[in-house]
Amino acid sequence: MTDRGPDLGPDLGPGGGTGLTGRWLGRRAFAEVLDEQLALREAVLAKTADPAVLIVEHPPTLTLGRRARRQDILWTDEQLAAFGVAICETPRGGQVTLHAPGQLVAYPVVPIGIQIRKHVTHLAGAAIELLAELGVGGAELRTDPLGVWTPAGKIASIGVHVRGGITVQGIAINLDVDPRLFFALVSCGMAGQPMVNARALGARPIEMAAAARRYAEAFARRRGVGLRWCTHAGGTGGPW
């Protein structure tokens, strides 16, 4: 693995530039981080904070997009409780998505205007770059159904919500998720479509915090901006 290199940009004050702040949050509850994204979006809209990409690992959670159907949750309440799986609603589009330990989740809170397709391309491109660095080749963005796919199956889910030209939510990349959790749902409404882990495809192990920084750097490059990296880990998030 190559050296991560220096930060890609200066330390910019709130609302003071076009750079991107990257924050590693460690393992945090989905609802808590969603509230943080929504508050940050208001601050970015008010120009009291710079755009940021929040990167996190969640406890087991099924998130319900605006088109989610209860029948796409396949486990009983007892099975969900046995694995400690929470259920949360989210403003993004799409259906039911899994979050869990071993999954790197990136939430850019950035201005995109109406360029949703370009933003999705940036989200996916940074994930494909990270996966290639870890030894997983052949990943590609597909738009129907949306996500990052390998020949073996879907490896990353994408869903965003835009208000005032500022996006929240983002991309969830399966690095080493407990594969039993994939059977808890019909992921994104795709019955019979396999979900896969990078580790099962031969990826090299990496600390989650290091993977978070790698992703943030790749995403910032695609936006053509500098990166100010911060670590505010409030929980676990070790190697896999």
Image (spheres, rainbow, N blue to C red):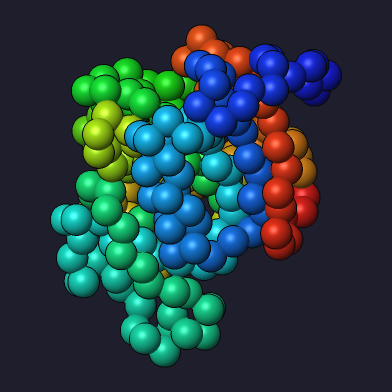
Q: Residue at x 53, y 65 (%)?
A: 29
Q: Residue at x 59, y 54 (%)?
A: 57
Relative to residue 125, is residue 75 drawn left or right? left
Give the position of the N terminus as an image quadrant. Answer: top right
- The tally of labels here is 0
Which image quadrant for residue 46? top left
Res. 111 visible in picture: yes
Judged from this view, the residue extending furthest toward the right is: 3
Figure check: 55 above or below 187: above
Relative to residue 98, is residue 143 drawn left or right? left
**Image location (x, y in percent) of residue 100:** 54, 60
**Image location (x, y in percent) of residue 90:** 31, 58
Q: Residue at x 77, y 54 (%)?
A: 238
Res. 141 visible in picture: no
Relative to residue 186, is residue 67 drawn left or right? left
Figure check: 47 above or below 107: above
Could you say which is closer to the camera, residue 110 or residue 45? 45
Which image quadrant for residue 134? top right
**Image location (x, y in percent) of residue 124:** 43, 27
Relative to residue 185, is residue 67 drawn left or right? left
Figure check: 108 above or below 6: below
**Image location (x, y in percent) of residue 68:** 20, 60
Judged from this view, the residue extending furthest toward the bottom is: 78
Could you say which is closer to the camera, residue 114 or residue 158? 114
Q: Residue at x 32, y 40 (%)?
A: 160
